[in-house]
Amino acid sequence: MSPLLEIENITKTFAVPSGIFGRQRVSAVDGVSLEIEAGEVLGLVGESGSGKTTLARCVLGLTPINGGAIRFDGVDVSGLRRSGLREFRRRVQPVFQDPFASLDPRWTVGRSIREALDSYRIGSPLDRDKRVLELLDRVGLSDQYAGRLPRQLSGGQRQRVGIAAALAGGPELIVADEPVSALDVSVQAQVLNLVADLQRDLGVAVLFVAHDLSVVEHISQRVAVMYLGRIVEIGAAGEVFTAPQHPYSQALVEAIPYPDPARRSTHVPLSGEIPSPVNPPDGCRFNPRCPITIDICRSLRPTLELTSELHLAACHVNAPSS
């Protein structure tokens, strides 16, 4: 049985200004391959500028890819037309970073949630009214919110509405792009718990994009770490957090704050800024910031290799001996 979502060696480049009249190509996603099983939560993490949001937009069909393939339920997404694309958009729904920007400020909460139900003609008008109230209850909001406007809600409440709207059409995959980064820390935990509960109860798959590894620690079955357009490590969440194999993943794990003074860091802290994608380093793109770089890291791109069962990392130094 094939995965629900298959991303195979996709690339995405953009043209950016160079000099007064020139332009050059920038690779935002460079040969990325991922799979998501039905009902699975895959956390995609990395610093700003790593290409996470571009990858998420490619999956949603909002940004066309330059190469490779994206297949949903075995069907190439790039080949979809009209009715096929419409059905794909019902089955794959986004939850965006800014809940205020993703909701029409002129629409009530109820209308925003009902939009998908009306568009896909799901149930009778009375059924749709009931479904809106059910979805509000599902995300922890009372029916009184149905008549409110987005500006009358807090950030956490707006994000709950965005999640309810995403669930309205009965999707099989939700692509959540930094859905809690704009929220207060206390509210982040509430929304994360909500997403975890919904995923468990409804069995929907989730691609959960975040720049903070701690955000996906307790919600993901697997974690993929992205750096400057490439996946550098992917594996079961427990393994990535307890035994990260790539130096970049190690640095992200060490940056997670734990309320335990006895817990000491064993790795060198991450230093420097992520290089510009306009002129990425040769070889391993992490080599200018890596504390264990050797000569080969500066010239040869490492490939993802198994370090244990179903755990892969792209590192010359930590590669398993052949």
Image (spheres, rainbow, N blue to C red):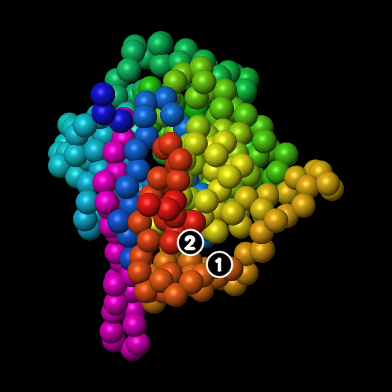
Q: Residues within 10 Å of mark 2 (few under 14, many from 20)?
A: some
Discs 2, 1 touching: Cβ within 8 Å = yes
> Residue 53: in sight, yes or no?
no
Q: Which residue is mark 2?
A: 317
Q: Residue at x 29, y 44 (%)?
A: 7
Q: Is residue 70 left or right of residue 153?
A: left
Residue closest to the eye, 268 or 139: 268
Percent x, y of residue 89? 30, 34
Q: Indicate the position of residue 263 as horizontal and vertical percent values.
A: 78, 47
Residue farthest to the bottom?
A: 20
Judging by the rendered image, the residue that carries numbered circle 1 is 292
> 221 above or below 47?
above
Q: Foreground residue, 135 or 287? A: 287
Q: Is residue 138 magenta?
A: no
SS class of the residue under badge 1? loop
Q: How many marks?
A: 2
Give the position of the N terminus as an image quadrant. Answer: top left
Is residue 183 something that shows in the picture?
yes
- Residue at screen point 48% across, 61% down: 317
Q: x%, y% of residue 262?
A: 83, 46
Principal secondary structure, stretch drawn in magenta: strand
Q: Is residue 292 above or below residue 38?
A: below
At label 2, the amino acid type is Val
What whole-number distance in Å separates the C-alpha atoms at marks 2 and 1? 7 Å
> Left or right: 205 with respect to 197?
left
The residue tagged with tag 2: helix, strand or loop? Answer: loop
Whether 219 is drawn above or below 257: the answer is above
Is 221 left or right of 241, judged from the image as shown? left
Q: Which residues are magenta?
A: 4-26
Q: As shown in the figure, which amino acid type bears the numbered disc 1? A: Ile
- Residue drawn where x is 38% and y is 61% of the image: 302
Of callouts 2 and 1, the N-terminal one: 1
